Amino acid sequence: MKDDIVTLTIDDIGTNGEGIGKVNGYTLFVKDAVVGDIVKAKIIKEKKNYGYGKLLDIIEKSKKRVVPECTVAKQCGGCQIQQMDYQSQLQYKQNLVKENLEKIGGLKDIEVLPVIGMDTPYHYRNKAQYPVGIDREGKVVIGFYAGRTHCIIDNTDCKIGSPINQTILETIRKYITEQRISIYDEESHQGILRHILIRNGYHTGEIMVCLVINGTKLPNFEKLIQDLIGISGMKSIMLNINRDKTNVILGKECKTLWGQDHITDSICDITYEISPLSFFQVNPVQTEKLYKKVLEFAQLSGEEIVWDLYCGIGTISLLMATNAKKVYGVEVVPEAIENARNNTRRNNFHNVQFFVGKAEVVVPQFYEEVSTKGMGDHQNKEAIQSLNPDVVVVDPPRKGCDEILLDVIIKMSPKRIVYVSCDSATLARDLKYLVSRGYEVKKVQPVDQFCHTVHVETIVLIQKKTS
Ligand code: SAH
């Protein structure tokens, strides 16, 4: 059947946003097709039970189909579903969470609330990482990888990024060309400039530009600085050293070329400093809605002991600290914890303590140590109280929580767990574990942090069963 041209109706959507339809009972995945489309496709890959089709023509357009704002939406791997109208995107994400909770988590009859969306779902990202390359004609390309490849689509006008990024990127492109800066080549591991990271403070307008290089120096960088500091809001120009042959974008070492080594921004009236290596939620408008839900689910009265695991720069920790007795934060990136401690001081909190390390190592160790020491001085009493928290917040990366961590959380026996997840499949797996060990799922609230992509953020309130 390979190379056959077929006509099919798209009636489902896959995990990567592709359309799914059937041809004589055979399932075909068609990238860029939308549920409701009738399309003509060419079969490009055939497996036993399913295949992949290339979209050739749309015979009848779905009502859900829109013209993407971005001219390279189809090629670019950044957004997968810009061709779907926004309400349908939200519906799709709600269904996705529900399906994962049922199929992976075995959680039937759980209400998944409608996804909290954005009023204007564009230009929302406060952080963007652009690969730099050279095309076949030897021209500098700056943009995004095409889906599932390392081919760079030249585009500095990203519709989900900050509009100012275009000016910054074109300034850097001019510098690269004029100063003949060598561009990193993945195959040969030669060349200097690899990626450009830009962070924008949503409330402050502050900008950080961080150039990721395969080396320790950027030639004639003063010329670039001269031009970049003319851009309003520029606060920090940095280098990140990444000499490894790897797909990981950032290396561990940063150097300041000009200005500060961080920018600041605020969420819910708390100010934060953010370094290049620290995690900070990428959609500031939605983050406020997300965090307010986390706070609502935590049901704090001012007397609670709270753990915030995977705390990043302490954003959720400090928000919790506004209405809790004591908050403990745990995070693996040392720079993020440095930010978190500075943020605590900057905002005058005195009831927060941070630990650096993997949550699945730090928390069990702490539990072991404190529970084997008896109750003694005041410090120790506080430590013992910390083992019996009211609320535990977890906000892990896509792979979810380690079982060792879930086990120690169960031992600590909090009244409530607030799970903030960016992958509903691993969320469902972890919920299944918690539900089999004395907890129940009370509320499931997705929030659209990543409009036009297939990703969805979900907050879950999990409560200890009383009977
Ligand atoms: N709650 C924060 C950060 C969430 S992102 C916020 O809302 O901004 C997840 C964080 O987990 C990142 O900061 C990442 O560095 C950290 N992380 C990843 N693996 C970890 C682990 N095993 N233990 C602790 N932190 C981890």
Image (tube, rainbow, N blue to C red):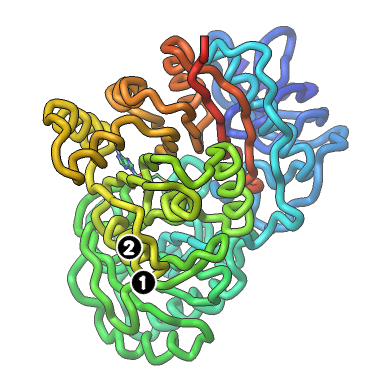
- Name which residue type carries label 2: Asn
Label 2 sits on a secondary structure element that is helix
Horizontal and vertical percent position of residue 282: 52, 55
What is the quadrant of residue 238 in the picture?
Answer: bottom left
**Mark 1 element type:** loop
- 68 lies left or right of 152: right
Residue linked to disc 2: 339
- Mark in the foreground, 1 or 2: 2
Q: Amino acid at mark 1?
A: His
- For label 1, the residue is 262
Q: Is residue 16 above or below residue 404?
A: below
**Which quarter of the image is occupied by the N terminus?**
top right
Left or right? Give the position of 22 relative to 280: right
In the figure, 459 relative to 133: above or below?
Answer: above
Callouts 1 and 2 close, C-beta under 8 Å: yes
- Quadrant assignment for ligand 1: top left
Q: Residue at the spot x=18%, y=71% of the render? A: 216
Marks 1 and 2, how far apart at CA:
9 Å
Identify which residue, 19 or 374, lies in the foreground.
374
**Residue 131 location, x and y as percent?**
41, 60
Residue 432 position (above or below residue 387): above
> Is residue 171 visible in the rendered structure shown here?
yes
